[in-house]
Amino acid sequence: MTSQTIVFTTDRNTFKTGVSWTAGVSLFLMPLIWIDPVTYLTLTIAGLSLGMLIFLIASGLTLIFGLMDVLNLAHAAFFAFGAYAGHTVLVFLNSLGWIETASLLNSLLYLVAALCAAAFVGALLGVVTERLVIKKVYGNHLMQLLVTVGVSFVIVEILKIIWGVNDEVVPVPAGFQDSFIVCGVFVEYFRVIAIILGVGVFAVLQFALKKTKIGIIVRAGVENREIVKTTGYNISRIFTLIFAAGAGLAAIGGTMMAIFNQAVDPGMGDQFLIFALIVVIIGGMGSITGSFVGAIIVGLSFNYVAFLVPKMALGVNFMIMAVILLIRPKGLFGKD
């Protein structure tokens, strides 16, 4: 009887997985009914690059929110501060006359410099925030919401003091403004780089959390913090590092989005925090894979609907989130 039950359960799970993949592929191809193939390919590439940029933000939120159980609404401010840090590096390089004449290789080097600056600033902000604020409110979600909103306001005001309240134009390295042709579609190099970076971050996070000792400790610490402490590990220090990593990823996402939009402003993090929250909810709390898949869904659906029915572009992601939560209340890859 037990073996029959196991077989039945396995068959049912396989059937559900097959149905899910069939539904997903069908929805992915459905826009071809209304959109010509060339436009569809253009929107798909743009949607994937947007999705990977959103994933950079959502992955940091997943580490902090999903793994550490911290409701961190200061994530948007980390994102914005990272955008300004990267912007400052690019402005400096532009003042030297290097941006406008940069080759693709040089553009990549300048991007790495901007991302490193953003990651450092974001991680530093994360450490300060976790040590001074978050450490005192672990386990208290209401207080986490209140104090992180306060931290967000403070960081945004600091941004305004340092860089001003007006929008700033981000100098984009010349190599990223070039494009190549695929099946009649002009593809910008920066979009390809955004996709590669998103996939790379996903692979690194998966490896770190599932195959390394620190990843095992983090996952064990989430399940039972006290037991990990008794084994001799400093879980508080590890959680600080995880919080810093999440903030650093948000900052990297900020710089990438600043180059993508070619502009920065102090409140730019708020709109993308909404996307990140939708992605985390769709994918399931604490699931990096879920955030990755959710980001692709959000990026593609936003672009397709923005082309077909512009006024529905943001609303469609809320609809997708609602439908998924009705079917799977804990998200696509959330633990049952």
Image (cartoon, rainbow, N blue to C red):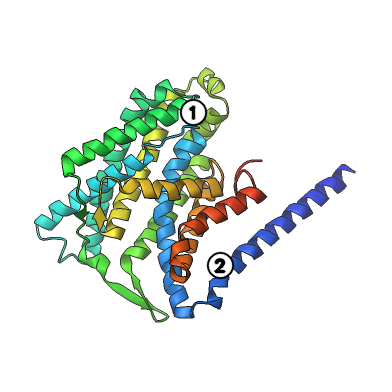
Residue in the foreground of this view, choosing between 262 and 208: 262
Q: Residue furthest right?
A: 1
Q: Residue at x 43, y 47 (%)?
A: 274
Determine the residue positioned at 28% across, 54% down: 258
Per the image, the residue denoted by label 1 is 141
Q: Residue at x 28, y 33 (%)?
A: 154
Task: Tell me the quadrant of the picture where the N terminus can be found.
Answer: top right
Task: Please tell me whether residue 255 is drawn above or below residue 28 in the rendered image.
Answer: above
122 sits to left or right of 241: left
Of residues 71 and 200, the one nearer the viewer is: 71
Of residues 240 and 106, the one nearer the viewer is: 240
In primary-sequence order, the first of circles 2 and 1 is 2
Left or right, residue 321 beside residue 239: right
Q: Where is residue 315 in the image (x, y as percent from the top left)?
A: 49, 57
Locate residue 222, reporting x and y percent.
53, 30
Q: Nearer the viewer, mark 2 or mark 1?
A: 1
Instruction: Tell me residue 106's x, y (percent).
Output: 21, 61
Q: Determine the secondary structure under disc 1.
A: helix
Say what amino acid the circle numbered 2 marks: Phe
**Among the 4 quarters of the image, the one containing residue 107:** bottom left
Q: Which residue is pictured at 48% across the width and 37% down the height?
A: 65
How many other residues sit within 10 Å of disc 1, few (<14), some (14-19) or many (≥20)? some
The circle on residue 28 is: 2
Distance from the alpha carbon under mark 2 to that under mark 1 = 37 Å
Q: Give the amino acid type for the residue marked by disc 1 in the picture.
A: His
